[in-house]
Amino acid sequence: MIEKISMPSSIRLKYLTGVDTDGKEMFKTRTINNITSSVTDELVYGLKAMLEEVQNSPIAEFTRIETSKITQS
């Protein structure tokens, strides 16, 4: 039997840092690791709202990356 085990997830933040000389938007990416699988998507999204309040740059993309381990038992 194949078993799927949830591993800690990560959150990737992509935020706008400015515009270059050609008018192209510049972004920076940050990752927050080791978010336990029991943390709900609602709580994760609440974190986004809190981070937006303290960031000087707007968050352009907010992604939760979930990882699972697949084993055979």
Image (tube, helix red, strand yellow):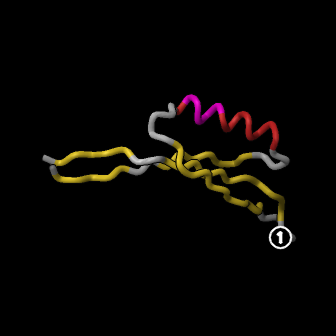
Question: Which residues lie in the magenta part?
Answer: 42-46
- Which residue is located at x 56 percent, y 29 percent? 42
How far across and down, in percent of the image, does residue 7 sit? 40, 48
Relative to residue 21, is residue 47 depicted above or below? above
- Which residue is located at x 27 percent, y 46 percent? 4
Residue type (three-letter) at the residue carrying disc 1: Asp
- Which residue is located at x 12 percent, y 46 percent? 1
How far across and down, in percent of the image, does residue 69 sit? 32, 52
Answer left or right for 2 relative to 38.
left
How far across and down, in percent of the image, does residue 45 sit? 61, 34
Residue 25 in which image quadrant: bottom right
How far across and down, in percent of the image, does residue 13 sit? 65, 51
Mark 1, residue position: 22
Relative to residue 18, is residue 11 depicted above or below? above
Tell me the SS state at disc 1: loop
* Magenta residue check for 31: no
Q: Main secondary structure of the magenta part?
A: helix
- Which residue is located at x 58 percent, y 48 percent? 11
